[in-house]
Amino acid sequence: MRYHLATYGCQMNEYDSAMIAQMLARFGAVSVSSPENADVIIVNTCSVREKAEETAIARIFQFKPVKQANPDLKIIIVGCMAKNRGEELLKKIKFVDFIVGPDQYRKIPELLELPKRKRLAFLDFDLEENYVGESAKILTPFSTHITIQRGCNKRCSYCIVPYVRGPEKYRLSSDILREVNEAAAQGVSEIMLLGQTVNAYRDGNETFASLLNRVSEIEGIKRIRFTSPHPRHYTQELLEVLTQNPKVCHHAHIPLQSGSNAILKKMRRQHDMETYYGIIDYLRSADPLYHISTDIICGFVGESEKDFEETLEAVERVQFDTAFMFVYSPRRGTESFKETEILTEDEKKERHTRLTEIQNAITLKRNKLMLGRTETLLVERLSSRDSSEMMGKTDNFKKVIFKPEGNVKPGDYVKCKIDDIRGWTLRGTLETNE
Ligand code: SF4
């Protein structure tokens, strides 16, 4: 049995695809890069924006001639769009065989044995399904992602995730630590822990803070990252671990969404700017170079010019290293979709442009603070611009390009003096291999 697996969306979808690949491998299936050579095509889809769903549907239609040429081929749609659109997809896309929601992936190997032309959807949430015992295939020989929490309880008014991923579930810490141990035994030194609100993690034995400590005790693990935390779940215990455990990297992606308390309330974000600034001040007073990235929505329903200016003030005050900035677009199926917008598309875009200009200048300023420092890089790959150079990342998630010497290879830790910046890109001179 040969399968082709196409993945869209976030790192959690990447993790789930890698887990499905492991389930299929146990079943004896092998991965093929070309859909034409596959017996089954699996498309793991995203639903976060309508555009993401349209992209996935367009991609699925590209498989229609492959199915016509090979009627025995099975096509399975999984992921958030599978859950969101459900059986409608079976009606709309006649050549698709199965629709499988995020809590039903263990069914996939069995589906391959079902008789031809049986078309089914498996969409139920399963509060008990935590994929205990499963491990995802390691992403690179030195770094991997591990999902520790699935779903979300927050119900932000613009977000579809709780409807497609269901309520929060936490994997058992024993199962997570088993997966980290297995990865470390295979040479992985960097772990990224994943969850929609990853720092809400708890399993009765460990909190998120204590789990970070437990992961850091595993031999071979040198760097721990995580995404995405929610501002509401930065406890004092967590702040202390983040600033005191040397293996937990000084890098956090903390969604801001808006700098206005009135808009945060409308978004049902469950935090205010005082809480947000408290976290930032704690992290940056421990390390002024602590990398903080964020997500910001421009032109949310009801956002006045004053609200937007509060966002600009927050951006100036925090000094984000990077930010993903989006123009608000109402998402069908969410609370805020029902509200009437007061801003035109042009007005929202104009705010986005103003915000982007300010943030771009701050990003450059933050990168320049790295000049003159000697940093340890985890070498990731050859530079995409010049294959005689390599790219590595600092603990605080800055990319640095350098000329390797000797047999430096991906997965190595090297020390580099950061001595130049070209455009946005930091450049360094190799000092030593660790
Ligand atoms: S915290 Fe809010 S934005 Fe994040 S996944 Fe949950 S509902 Fe969506």
Image (spheres, helix red, strand yellow):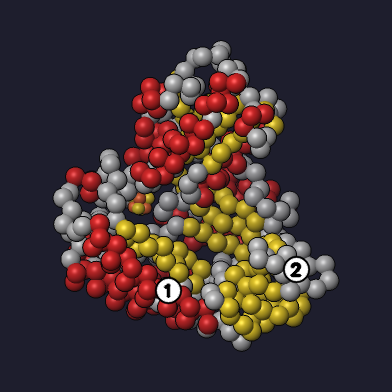
Type of the residue with mark 1: Asn
| Image location (x, y in percent) of residue 239 | 45, 69
Can residue 98 be seen by looking at this rendering? no
Can residue 326 be seen by looking at this rendering? yes
Taking 314 as reference, is 288 left or right? right
Q: Which mark is residue 360?
A: 1
Q: Earlier in the sequence, mark 1 or mark 2?
A: 1
Q: Which mark is residue 294?
A: none
**Label 2 belongs to which residue?**
388
| Residue at (36, 32) in percent of width and height | 85
| Image location (x, y in percent) of residue 209 | 49, 61
Taking 383 as reference, is 264 left or right? left
In which quadrant of the rendered image does the N terminus lie?
Answer: top right
| Residue at (40, 33) in percent of width and height | 83
| Residue at (74, 80) in percent of width and height | 431
Q: Which of 75 and 131 is in front in this view?
A: 75
| Image location (x, y in percent) of residue 126 | 42, 32
Taking 327 as reference, is 113 left or right? right
| Residue at (52, 26) in percent of width and height | 64
- Which residue lies most toward the right here? 406
Q: Which of 165 and 7 is in front in this view?
A: 7
Type of the residue with mark 2: Ser
Quadrant of residue 285 in the image? bottom left
